[in-house]
Amino acid sequence: MVISCGFNWTSNPRSTHQNIMDETQVFNIIWEVLSESHNEYMADFDQMPFSRILKAFLSHFYEIFKEVDNFGDIEKIKQKNDILLVFSHLFKKLNPSIYPCFAFAWLDIISSRHFMPFMLSTVSEFHNQERWLKMQELFNALFIFLKENIYENSETTPALEKFFEGTLKICLVVLHDYPEFLCYYYFQFINNLPLYRTGNLRNMILAAYPKSIRLPDPANEITKYEPSNVLHGQDRQTLLQFYVDEGDYYTLKADLDNYLGKKLHPNTSNHYLETKSEAKLKQICEYLESCQVIKNHRRIIDTGVVHATMLYLASDIEEMKTVKELENPGLAEKFELMCKFLSTPVRDILLNSMFNELRLLNMSTVFFLSTLLQIFRNANPEENIVSSQIARICVGRLRLPKIQPWGLLVFRNKISKEAKFKSMNITTQQQP
C-alpha cells in the first residue's frame, strides 16, 4: 500500500503550519472512521486496514526523517518534531483502554522502528523533552490498559498473555537502548502497573540506569553515593499534587508539613512546630487508607498517592551529606510508626513503594535500604507480620529471572545476613 501524504518540506513557517494542519485533518478522519467502525462492529472489528494505513504514513515519513537527520537542517528538524507530535497525539486518542479491539495494532505501531526511536532519541534537537513527555503518555496508556485487565483473581486469556509478552519485549528494547527514559519516568510507570503478575515488567523499569554511569558491585559496602538522580523538594511536591485529589491536596500537604516542621510560607519566618506527633501521622495514615480509585468496577488503594506521600515524608533527608547521616535510625521512625498504623494491604503498598526506591546508587536508595532493614529488625517479634511482609516482597522480586534493580541486589545481600531472616528459612536465590 502506498500513500501520498502530500507534505512538502519548506522553510516557510506559514506553509509548514498549513501542511501540518492538513496532516492533522487527515489523521482526524482516520480516527473518526476507526472509532465508528470499532463501536459498530466490536468483536468483528478488523484492525488491519487501519494498521496498514498508519504504518504507511510512518514509513513515508521515516524516509524523510532519515534524510533530515543526515543534513541537519534546523528548520526541517523543527518540522520533523512537529509531525512526530501530531502522530503521538493521534496514537494517544487511539489508546487500547478506549479501543481494545485495536490494541494489538496500536502496540505494534507505537513501538515501530519508524516511530519510537525518533521519539526517544536523546540527540540534541528541539523539544526533546516534549517528545519524551508524549511518549510517556503512550506508555502510561499501555500500562493503565494492563492494570484494567490484570488484577487479583482475574482470568488470564491467551490474547492478554500475548499482549503482555509484547509489552515486555518493547520495554526490554527501551531498557537496552533508551534507559534514561525509564529512569526519568519510573514513578509514573510503576504506579500505573497492575499490582499482580507484572513483576518482570516492574523490575525492568526499576533496573534502568543512565548509560553514563557504572554501578559498583552490589556485594560491596556503600560508603558514598552519587548526588545526581535525586528527587528534590519541588519534585516531591509536584508528585504529591499530581496524584492527590485537588480537594484533599492542601489538607494533606498541611498535615505533612505540620508533621515535618516545615515553613508555613517561604516568605515568612513562621514555622510549624516540629512535634513529630503520632496523632498527626496516624491522621495521615487514615487518609492513605481511604484514597481509592476504581478499576474494573473495583475499588483499590491508589498506589501513586501512597508512594508520593512516602517520598514527601522522606524530604527531610535532602540536607544529608553522608551515608552515615542517611542511616540514622531516627529518620526511619516515622515509617516504623506508619507500618504500625496501617492495615496489612495498605502497609504492603507502602513497603512495595520503599522497594521501588531501591534503584540507583543515590540518596533515596541508601535511605530506604536502611529504613527497610530497621523496620525488619524492630518489628514486633510476637506478631512478626511486618517482617514477613518485607521478606516476602524481597524474595518475590528476586525470584524473577535475569533483570533486577541494583538496589534490590544490595538489599538482598544485607538482609541475608540478618539472623531473623535466616530463621525464616527463606532463600533469596532465583528460581530456575
Image: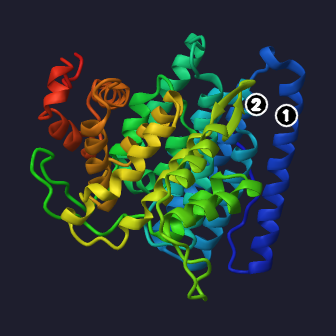
Up-down: is 23 above or below 9? above
Numbered tag placed on residue 411 in the rendering: none
Query: Quick one: 246 or 189, which is closer to the camera?
Result: 246
Residue 377 as seen in the image, left or right of residue 32: left
Q: Which class describes the residues within 10 Å of circle 2: few (<14), some (14-19), or many (20+)?
A: some
Quadrant (top left, top right, bottom left, bottom right) of the C terminus: top left
Query: Quick one: 109 or 270, which is closer to the camera?
Result: 270
Q: Which class describes the residues within 10 Å of circle 1: few (<14), some (14-19), or many (20+)?
A: some
Identify the element where label 1 is drawn. helix
Q: Residue at x 60, y 11 (%)?
A: 155
Residues at discs 1 and 2 in contact (Cβ within 8 Å): yes
Residue 287 as seen in the image, left or right of residue 123: right
Q: Which residue is mark 1?
A: 35
Locate residue 92, reporting x and y percent: 70, 46
Query: Quick one: 341 or 395, which is closer to the camera?
Result: 341
Locate residue 30, reporting x and y percent: 82, 41
Q: Residue at x 80, y 14 (%)?
A: 44
Numbered tag placed on residue 99 in the rendering: 2
Locate residue 36, reporting x and y percent: 89, 31
Up-down: is 208 above or below 97? below
Identify the element where label 2 is drawn. loop
> Residue type at mark 2?
Tyr
User: Looking at the rendering, which quadrant does residue 292 occupy?
Assistant: top right
What's the colour scheme?
rainbow
Residue 384 seen in the figure: yes
Up-down: is 95 above or below 279? above
User: Looking at the rendering, which quadrant does residue 410 occupy?
Assistant: top left
